[in-house]
């Protein structure tokens, strides 16, 4: 492909870059100035890159605009994911943002380069984009081009910086649909902070037994400020609702991730009760959350079932809810997330909808959590959850 210079757009290819510019490029590029009238104060050129060619990391004091006009290329700002560029795509580069752009490994690429604020726009050239980095961020470029929105790219990159998805190479159509939906459209709804959203998804993953996705979100959580203690408390809270047999593999997986990231185990203990006071403290917390009906439920339970009510007070609430590491609002929201994710728990969901309201989580917050979990639990469980919310908190 590199032996010929194809015309891949309506604009001229121009000549090889002069030495004063080519030393800042890896591979061969071509330059065709398109404007001549300096009084217009808006220089525009067509730049064409051979496959694999890219410029060094650099910045412009006055910014720059790129308009893709042919082939397939990439743009990457420092600290962000590389963005695939196809004809018609526009990149607005703010002043002093360090970035690079160039062709994909398997395609020629042309873009219009528009110099903004040319009267004092200076370029600072930095180090080359080495082969290892270039190969990493353009992996999958031979697959069907995936067109992601800027918000989907930004939100995904916030959770997993520089992550290259194997699924994007094997199932590009699905990733294009899912990422634009889950990391743009869905995230745009509601009032959840990123950290809270990630924690709720982690709880949901445990309830759904989605170990692969859970491990992704443990790393995402650590990347956005979820502490190791908070992650462990999500796990411990889930034992009461999901069961230890289905949680233990998630604990082991978490420990492996912590080990890889240099987090020393065991973590500092968070328990606040003793065998002597766990039942009393748990019962008091249950009453504070759900009201005096808790006492009536125990009194009215058949004799052969009262022990379950005692376990709820001493174990579920006394052993877990009273722990440090997560506040009560977060624990109740996690419980809600796990219950709606398991399915078949509508009676418990309605009870914990009211519990969430009682501890300060309003309907909008519950709908926000439900919406954020939709991509991971599907529509039937999501609609069941909304029905429960509406029954307890009518519109």
Image (tube, grey):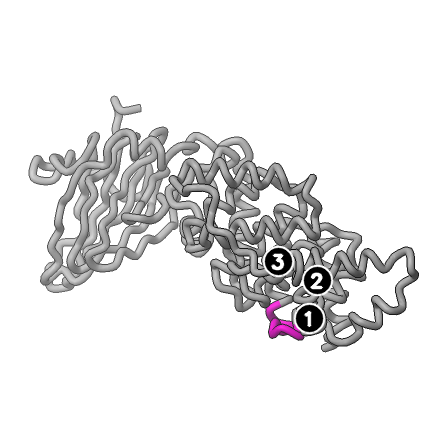
Let me know if residue 360 is in the magenta part.
Answer: yes
How many residues crowd around disc 3 within 10 Å: few (fewer than 14), some, or many (20 or more)?
few
Image coordinates for residue 138, horizontal then vertical, percent: 37, 35
Q: Which residue is at a point 12% across and 49% down the rendered structure image? A: 124
Residue assigned mark 2:
279
- Secondary structure, mark 2, is helix
Which dot marks residue 276? none
Magenta stretch: give its range: 357-365
For the residue pair 238 and 284, the one nearer the viewer reads as 284
Residue 325 image position (x, y, % from top left): 51, 59
Q: Position of residue 259 (x, y in %)?
A: 43, 37
Q: Nearer the viewer, mark 1 or mark 2?
A: 2
Determine whether 99 is above or below 274 in the image.
Answer: above
Q: Quadrant of the C terminus?
A: bottom right
Left or right: where does residue 19 sit relative to residue 220? left
Proximity of marks 1 and 2: CB atoms separated by less than 8 Å = no
Q: Earlier in the sequence, mark 1 or mark 2?
A: 2
Q: As drawn, which residue projects farthest toward the top? A: 3
- Tell me if mark 2 has few (under 14), some (14-19) or many (20+) residues whose alpha carbon lies within 10 angstroms of its own: many
Residue 177 visible in the current orientation: yes
What's the mark number on residue 274?
3
Residues under labels 3 and 1: Cα distance?
A: 15 Å
Q: Are marks 3 and 2 in contact (CB under 8 Å)?
A: no
Q: Earlier in the sequence, mark 3 or mark 1?
A: 3
Q: CA distance from mark 3 to mark 2?
A: 9 Å
Report the residue at 45% width, 53% height from top.
Answer: 227
Q: Which mark is residue 284?
A: 1
Foreground residue among 123 and 40: 123
Quadrant of the frame with the N terminus: top left
């Amino acid at each position: 492909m590199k032996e010929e210079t194809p015309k891949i757009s309506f604009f001229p290819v121009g000549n090889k870059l002069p030495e004063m510019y080519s030393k800042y490029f890896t591979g061969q590029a071509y330059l065709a100035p398109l404007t001549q009238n300096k009084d217009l104060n808006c220089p525009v050129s067509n730049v064409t890159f051979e496959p694999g060619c890219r410029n060094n990391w650099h910045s412009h004091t006055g910014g720059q605009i790129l308009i893709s006009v042919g082939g397939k290329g990439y743009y990457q700002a420092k600290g962000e994911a590389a963005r695939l560029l196809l004809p018609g795509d526009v990149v607005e580069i703010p002043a002093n943002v360090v970035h690079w752009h160039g062709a994909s490994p398997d395609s020629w690429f042309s873009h219009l380069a528009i110099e903004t604020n040319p009267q004092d726009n200076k370029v600072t050239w930095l180090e080359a984009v080495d082969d290892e980095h270039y190969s990493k961020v353009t992996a999958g470029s031979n697959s069907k081009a995936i067109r992601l929105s800027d918000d989907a790219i930004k939100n995904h990159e916030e959770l997993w910086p520089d992550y290259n998805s194997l699924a994007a190479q094997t199932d590009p159509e699905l990733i294009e649909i899912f990422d634009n939906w889950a990391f743009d459209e869905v995230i745009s709804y509601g009032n959840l902070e990123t950290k809270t959203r990630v924690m709720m998804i982690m709880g949901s993953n445990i309830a759904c037994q989605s170990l692969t996705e859970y491990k992704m979100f443990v790393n995402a959580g650590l990347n956005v400020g979820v502490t190791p203690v908070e992650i462990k408390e999500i796990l411990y809270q889930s034992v009461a609702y999901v069961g230890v047999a289905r949680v233990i593999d998630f604990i082991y997986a978490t420990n492996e991730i912590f080990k890889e990231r240099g987090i020393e185990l065991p973590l500092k203990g968070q328990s606040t009760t003793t065998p002597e006071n766990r039942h009393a403290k748990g019962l008091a917390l249950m009453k504070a959350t759900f009201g005096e009906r808790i006492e009536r439920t125990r009194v009215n339970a058949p004799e052969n079932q009262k022990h379950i009510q005692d376990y709820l007070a001493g174990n579920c609430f006394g052993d877990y809810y009273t722990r440090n590491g997560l506040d009560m609002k977060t624990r109740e929201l996690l419980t809600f997330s796990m219950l709606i994710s398991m399915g078949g728990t509508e009676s418990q969901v309605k009870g914990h909808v009211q519990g969430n309201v009682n501890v300060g989580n309003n309907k909008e917050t519950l709908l926000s959590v439900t919406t954020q979990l939709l991509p991971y639990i599907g529509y039937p469980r999501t609609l069941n959850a909304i029905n429960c919310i509406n029954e307890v908190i009518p519109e």
